[in-house]
Amino acid sequence: MEDDEVSNKQVVLKNYVIGSPKESDMEVRIIKMRLKISEGSNAVLVKNLYLSCDPYMAGRMRNPDSDHRSFVESFLPGSPIMGYGVAKVLESGHPNFKKGDLVWGITGWEEYSFITSPEALFKIEHSDVPLSYYTGILGMPGMTAYVGFYHICSPKKGERVFVSAASGAVGQLVGQFAKLMDCYVVGTAGSKAKVDLLKTKFGFDEAFNYKEEQDLEMALKRHFPEGIDIYFENVGGKMLDAVLLNSRIHSRIAVCGLISQYNLKQPESVHNLFSLIMKRIRVEGFIVSDHYDQYPKFLDMVLPLIREGKVTYVEDVAEGLERAPAALVGLFSGHNVGKQVVVVARE
Amino acid sequence: MEDDEVSNKQVVLKNYVIGSPKESDMEVRIIKMRLKISEGSNAVLVKNLYLSCDPYMAGRMRNPDSDHRSFVESFLPGSPIMGYGVAKVLESGHPNFKKGDLVWGITGWEEYSFITSPEALFKIEHSDVPLSYYTGILGMPGMTAYVGFYHICSPKKGERVFVSAASGAVGQLVGQFAKLMDCYVVGTAGSKAKVDLLKTKFGFDEAFNYKEEQDLEMALKRHFPEGIDIYFENVGGKMLDAVLLNSRIHSRIAVCGLISQYNLKQPESVHNLFSLIMKRIRVEGFIVSDHYDQYPKFLDMVLPLIREGKVTYVEDVAEGLERAPAALVGLFSGHNVGKQVVVVARE
């Protein structure tokens, strides 16, 4: 083993996934690598600290030829999983970064990564908040909540807001943003613990466990006797159908994710599109990466809210890269409570 | 029979309709009435000239308790069908109208109607164009095309536009508006005659008969190898699913009508909502009556286009109130070619 050679633990996709990802679709392996950037390269070499488990990643695990449902490139079987993470620069061939910088952005599920397009990384300028927040409230999920709620939902003070997957990485923030606008906010989640969290920790006005409802249409009618102005859609399927029947005139639906649908062979169908006309509903899908130019503005808003304790953020932390496959797989059965993070190293 | 008593032929809804309306759901009857407004009433008494057959009317024929799918009040069984029409004022209790005025708006399917909320009527100021046009290009369908295309679709010069039910009252105009913006326009309709009309009369770049396509997704891919920017949705169901798979990034779908779905017990399902996220699609339903404040602006635009022959309008004219039930029913099997009008009287 040469001087600058280290072992690099990696989580690798074994084969394209069919249906829901399983732990056995991934394997942990150790390779040897040199912690050195080649002469003339503008890559940066980073040590990964925190990795983010996000639902969209299931789409990247499927065969690109078989699937209409992913908006990003598939992973390469035999190579490490890629995803958002927080990392520390060990060496930089790029003028924007230097040794010791903290960054967040797309990195590998491994201890050390070469990042060959470092332009896409965000430099972390504020480290008085937990670093792991840059996988969540201060990273992609935070921006998703911000863009989705403030831009796509066009919220007005006091409106009636419904959030699905409400205790998740994005949902918990959407609810809090809505409360800051004096909205009436109801969330749904899949366990009693999560429902309690919504009410006690995130300040939702009401919350319910969708798994305990026989009839989602009636559940929504109970919580929104006057209907829903804004639906922040994270799940799809039956919930969307129920919302369509409980929508108010000129309501808006921001389609952020459809987690109930990602791993179905045939997505569930939606029937109640008549409501789109009857209620003049606007439904809009969005992808956060189209909106990263607004990241500085977002930070200006959300950093003070964090520092003043006006928003809170719950993370579900898995310790160690070995636990990353289980953490990712757990997203699709609702195992996580709050934002699912994997700690690779704390520094 | 008193001096001012006349016979008034009416088309009456016999019972609430289940499924698709049939001719036997309506009956033609003759009643006696006095052509006189009661003292102090602000109603107007009109002689109906042209009546409009519109798909949304099916919703008004169903039992309001049984149906999620109508955005307007149901008709009353035993009473005349109501709908848009062109009429001549015989007597007026309302300061805005006087004897001899021509108006368009909601009236009864009968020879003479008392209109008790005449504020909702539009006075016809321009009669150098065919009067029947006020049931179509210059009336509700024209406004629908205008609002739906210019406001809901946010069109840009040269975009790729797809219109379903393209030879209908609204579709034929949407296509022509899009051509005026140098868009590439493809329409679909349900017969060879209609498809020919789209290309030869309305200037669509391409058109196809959806009934002859095994695979709508492939048909759209053929006509839009680079995808669709704007879909003007008049039909729903499978066509919407196929469009979702052929949409371009940041495309828009104006949901104007879902004629394939109005009369189904259980609406067809739509599966491909993933595309909403992947392609950042905006889908928006609208109802023209929310936008009637823009009618004067619309007239300013469209009247010169008609007079200069820059837009054209095809009507399918049924002669006589007796033919009105068949004309209405025919909409749902695509029997009409162009805007379906019923002539009650020419003056």
Image (tube, coloured by chain):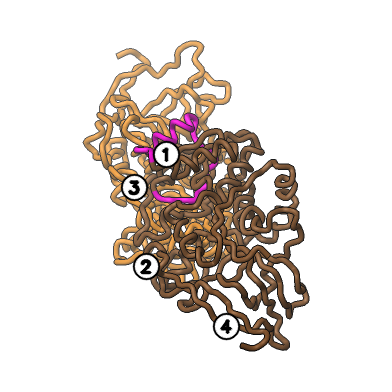
Chain colours: A orange, B brown
- Quadrant hosting residue B293: bottom right
Tag nearer the camera, 3 or 1? 1
Q: Is residue B248 visible?
A: no
Say what amino acid the circle numbered 4 marks: Lys
Residue A250 figure quarter: bottom right
Q: Which residue is mark 2?
A: B18
Q: Secondary structure at mark 3?
A: loop
Query: Foreground: A278 or A83?
Result: A278
- Residue positioned 42% across, 39% down in the render: B245
- Split into 4 quadrants, where in the image is the C terminus of chain A? top left
| Residues packed near mark 1 inside 10 Å, few (<14), some (14 to 19) or many (20 plus) | many
Give me the chain letter of mark 2.
B
Q: CA distance from mark 4 to mark 2?
A: 31 Å
Reading the image, the residue beneath label 1 is B245
Q: Nearer the viewer, mark 2 or mark 1?
A: 2
Q: Which residue is mark 4?
A: B32
Question: Is residue B232 or residue B103 the one in the foreground?
Answer: B103
Residue at mark 3: A261
Q: Is residue B271 visible?
A: yes
- The amino acid sitting under disc 1 is Leu
Magenta stretch holds residue B161 = no
Which residues make up the magenta segment?
B212-237
Q: Nearer the viewer, mark 4 or mark 3?
A: 4
Distance in Å between CA atoms under marks 2 and 3: 33 Å
Q: Earlier in the sequence, mark 2 or mark 1?
A: 2
Q: Secondary structure at mark 2?
A: loop
Quadrant of the snapshot with the N terminus of chain A: top left
Decide which of tag 4 and tag 1 comes sooner along the chain: 4
Q: Element at badge 1?
A: helix
In the image, residue B64 lies at what x, y percent?
Answer: 44, 72
